[in-house]
Amino acid sequence: MIKRTLYFGNPAYLKTNNGQLVIEMHDSGETKTAPIEDLGLLILDHQQITITQALMAKLLDANVALVTCDHSHHPAGLLFNLEGNSLQSMKIQAQVEATQPLKKQLWQQTIIAKIKNQAVILKNQNQNDKFLQALATDVKSGDPDNCEATAAAYYWKRVFPEFLDFKRERFGLPPNNLLNYGYAILRALVARSLVGSGLLPTLGIHHRNQYNAYCLADDIMEPYRPYVDRIVCGIIRKNGKFLEMTAAMKKEFLSLPAIDVKLEGQKSPLMNAVQRTTASLAKCYEGKIRKINYPEM
Amino acid sequence: MWVLIFFDLPTETQKDRKIYAKFRKDIMGNGFQMFQFSIYLRHCSSKENADVHLKRVKKILPPKGHIGLMCITDKQFGMMEIFQGHEDIESPETLQQLELF
């Protein structure tokens, strides 16, 4: 089932009663309730939101990803439960003991899927996608030639219209802000699914920055990034150069969990597809299968 | 898809009232909300999801009393007209996957 996304951009008091999320809106004085078990993602994006500890505990218990935003409305942190799966310790054991060759193969599959999806985006933007298509077939186990970086350099130069003079930098000019926002939402979704599949989002297959707490989420979200890029392309088409974040743009990003994604020839919402990806990853670690299920655009 | 629960439970003895209060609390804990006295409803995103909730309610049925369970589609639910006195009021909204508050 596709879980609900709730976004709070106004003052509110959030508490729990009877296992439900109770929302007291500050301005209108309205009270609404939502069943916690139906929720997947909760985004808190206002300085005057109050949330009770009992509610947080219940959200974590239901494996809801709780995202808090900073003063500039960008996602700042995620909150997850420690016990997302009944076979937790067995799965984590398998994850920790994964061999280097296995990890390298998984990384190869990830990069191939990512480059292929990037190629589709370029094609949609009426750019030549032949280079990336060819590159995708050249990726070796562990990506020793760093095809990922070659693809990224080629991709970012062409994906957005020329007038933007785009450079992909973390804190760069728009539309970097849009990309960051979308990726942060995606990261929360992926990290949530990883926890749900009994894996530790901290131990990556390729990313291993000691300061990064979500290495595995960053690995697994790679092939999904182009879906965010596609949303950003759409926003640029509508807004031209004016790319300060607006409520309408946020709404487009927040629809991310529900967009249709093709996985193994089947269409499903992105949130469910991510769950299938992480489930297949857990099986790879356990040696049951050799292929991660990644979406194709 | 909407799931509706209609119930009439005995409230003569203290024990009956206790069972009644527990049942009411339990269904609210499953995400049902009061629509009118003794009529509770819940929106479910799919038939399968509705089945889950029907099953759960069937598990906690009180020993005595009359209880009706019904599923209707969003379209049928949307055709309902609700009044407060003579005034037309809005029926509960269908839940969306994404909601902004």
Image (cartoon, coloured by chain):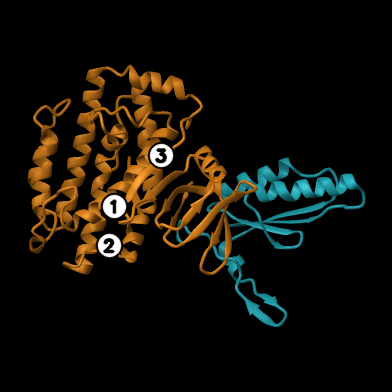
Task: Give the camera-side residue of A164 and A293.
Answer: A164
For residue A2, above or below residue A275: below
Q: CA distance from mark 3 to mark 2?
A: 25 Å
Determine which residue is flagged by label 2.
A245
- Residue A122 x %, y %: 14, 52
- At 26% from the left and 35% from the top, the residue drawn is A219
Colour in which the image shows chain B: cyan
Residues under numbered marks 3 and 2 in contact, where contact means CB atoms less than 8 Å apart = no
Q: In the structure shown, which secondary structural element does the residue marked by tag 1 occupy?
A: helix
Contact, CB < 8 Å: mark 1 with mark 2?
A: yes
Please name the color used to draw chain A. Answer: orange
Q: Assign a secondary structure to mark 3.
A: helix
Work out whether B62 lies above or below B67: above
Callouts 3 and 1 on one subunit:
yes
Left or right, residue A208 beside residue A264: left
B74 or B30: nearer the eye? Answer: B30
Residue at point 70% right, 77% down? Answer: B84
The chain ID associated with circle 3 is A
The disc at residue A181 is 1
Type of amino acid at the residue the image marks with label 3 = Arg
**Against A235, is B56 above or below?**
above
